[in-house]
Image: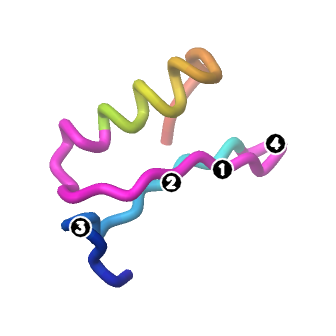
Amino acid sequence: MPSVEGYNHLVLAREDISGWVEGRSLRSTKSRSVARFLYEDVICRHGVYGEYH
């Protein structure tokens, strides 16, 4: 993926039943960045699922 303003990583989360995908570009793959994506883009929007893989 080409880097744009330092964003050169992509993180995705997909819901298995519907196939709905949420994604975000990241500058870092550190756990804090990924956790922020999960919290802001998945949990705050859709609620807590039974389990994450």
> 41 left or right of 19?
left
Residue that numbered label 3 is attached to: 5
Marked residue nearer the N-terminal end (3 or 1): 3
Q: Quadrant of the N terminus?
A: bottom left
> 16 left or right of 34?
right
Residue that numbered label 1 is attached to: 21
What residue range appears in magenta? 16-34
Mark toward the viewer: 3 or 1 = 3
Q: Residue at x 52, y 51 (%)?
A: 23
Q: Are the two marked residues, 4 and 1, in contact with CB atoms closer than 8 angstroms?
A: no
Report x, y in % for residue 52.
50, 34
Please say whether residue 21 is one of the residues in the magenta stretch.
Answer: yes
Nearer the observer, 42 or 48: 42
Marked residue nearer the N-terminal end (3 or 2): 3
Mark 4–mark 2 Cα distance, whole angstroms, equals: 16 Å
Amino acid bearing label 2: Leu
Residue that numbered label 4 is attached to: 17
Mark 3–mark 1 Cα distance, whole angstroms, equals: 24 Å
Q: Are the two marked residues, 3 and 1, in contact with CB atoms closer than 8 angstroms?
A: no
Report x, y in % for residue 12.
50, 54
